[in-house]
Image (cartoon, grey):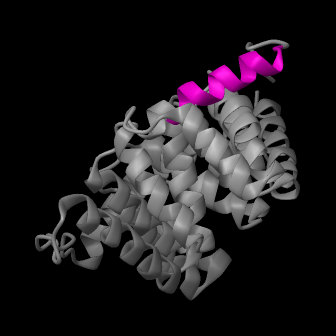
């Protein structure tokens, strides 16, 4: 396990780190010190901690990029229906280098792992922010998803499953899907064709980014059993153990300590399973 290499800092150093993070949040368009004073005046200790802990202790950590942290936060806020924060972090995510297409792609994973109603509500918040940024009443029309027959969905699904499992799953689509259907019935069939075949196979986000998003959603919702599959998958997609651990650190702020602790323990069990395979 990694440790934060920022070391022991004075309060002034933590505050300075927080102000630098805030400047990145806003692209330097707002005075960070003035914003900090205003937040403390309005929210008291909560406002102080929003700077010194959220930004100074967590967002300033070097183990993940600001772009990666925005993936985590947008996915978590969308999955939990945190409307005001999601609107704010949509713009912050853009300032950290996410594209609009990538933010929209997060919503597809929210649909799969937190439900369509949750994703639809979150997409509306994101769209409202886009319209505000553009100063328009209506966004341009979007393109539809690829319209695939089931055989193509299964072909794509088996390739995704091979990627997720590091080649441990069957390379035969019929056999692989049959195994999932045997385990989960109709749920397994929908998961295979839609989640793996339609969604995970899309090019709009890398597999690494998708693993970040999915682990974040599962952790914030307390779906720790699913992490037994998706933590090893994230390793197969190029995330390091330190980076996966850092997702749990980010979750202390956006999911709470209990959720982060549960996710951390599930992550450790998954690492142990990987290690036991030799």
Q: Position of residue 159 (x, y in %)?
A: 38, 52
The verdict on residue 131 being magenta is no
Q: Is residue 143 above or below residue 207?
A: below
Q: Position of residue 274 (x, y in %)?
A: 75, 36
At 50% from the left and 45% from the top, the residue drawn is: 70
At 50% from the left and 69% from the top, the residue drawn is: 110
Count how many numbered circles sit on residues in the image: 0
The quarter of the picture where residue 28 lies is top left
Q: Is residue 224 above or below residue 238?
A: below
At 63% from the left and 51% from the top, the residue drawn is: 230
Viewer-nearest residue: 7 or 213: 7
Q: Position of residue 91 (x, y in %)?
A: 38, 52
At 33% from the left and 52% from the top, the residue drawn is: 102
The quarter of the picture where residue 233 lies is top right
Q: Is residue 18 above or below residue 273?
A: above
Q: Position of residue 21 (x, y in %)?
A: 55, 30
Viewer-nearest residue: 167 or 121: 121
What are the residue bounds of the magenta stretch?
9-22
Residue 166 in view of the camera: no
The kind of secondary structure the magenta stretch mainly shows is helix
The verdict on residue 12 being magenta is yes
Viewer-nearest residue: 64 or 223: 64
Quadrant in which the N terminus is drawn: top right
Residue 199 in view of the camera: yes
Quadrant in which the C terminus is drawn: top right
Side (left or right) of 101 relative to 182: left
The quarter of the picture where residue 241 lies is top right
Side (left or right) of 216 relative to 158: right
């Amino acid at each position: 396990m990694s440790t934060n290499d920022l070391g022991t800092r004075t309060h002034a150093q933590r505050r300075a780190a927080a102000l630098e993070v805030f400047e990145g949040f806003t692209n330097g368009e707002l005075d960070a010190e003035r914003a900090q004073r205003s937040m403390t005046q309005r929210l008291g200790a909560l406002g102080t901690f929003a700077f010194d802990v959220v930004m100074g202790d967590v967002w300033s950590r070097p183990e993940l990029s600001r772009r990666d942290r925005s993936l985590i936060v947008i996915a978590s806020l969308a999955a939990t229906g945190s409307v005001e924060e999601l609107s704010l972090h949509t713009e912050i995510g853009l300032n950290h280098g996410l594209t609009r297409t990538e933010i929209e792609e997060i919503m597809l994973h929210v649909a799969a792992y937190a439900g369509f109603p949750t994703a639809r509500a979150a997409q509306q918040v994101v769209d409202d922010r886009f319209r505000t940024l553009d100063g328009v009443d209506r966004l341009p029309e979007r393109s539809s998803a690829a319209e695939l027959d089931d055989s193509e969905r299964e072909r794509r699904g088996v390739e995704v499953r091979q990627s997720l499992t590091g080649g441990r799953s069957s390379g035969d689509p019929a056999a692989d899907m049959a195994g999932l259907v045997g385990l989960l019935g109709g749920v397994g069939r929908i998961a295979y064709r839609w989640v793996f075949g339609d969604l995970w196979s899309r090019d709009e986000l890398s597999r690494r980014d998708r693993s970040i998003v999915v682990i974040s959603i599962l952790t914030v919702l307390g779906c720790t059993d699913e992490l037994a599959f998706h933590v090893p998958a994230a390793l197969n997609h190029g995330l390091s153990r330190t980076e996966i651990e850092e997702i749990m650190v980010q979750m202390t702020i956006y999911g709470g300590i209990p959720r982060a602790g549960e996710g951390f323990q599930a992550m450790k069990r998954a690492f142990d399973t990987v290690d036991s395979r030799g």
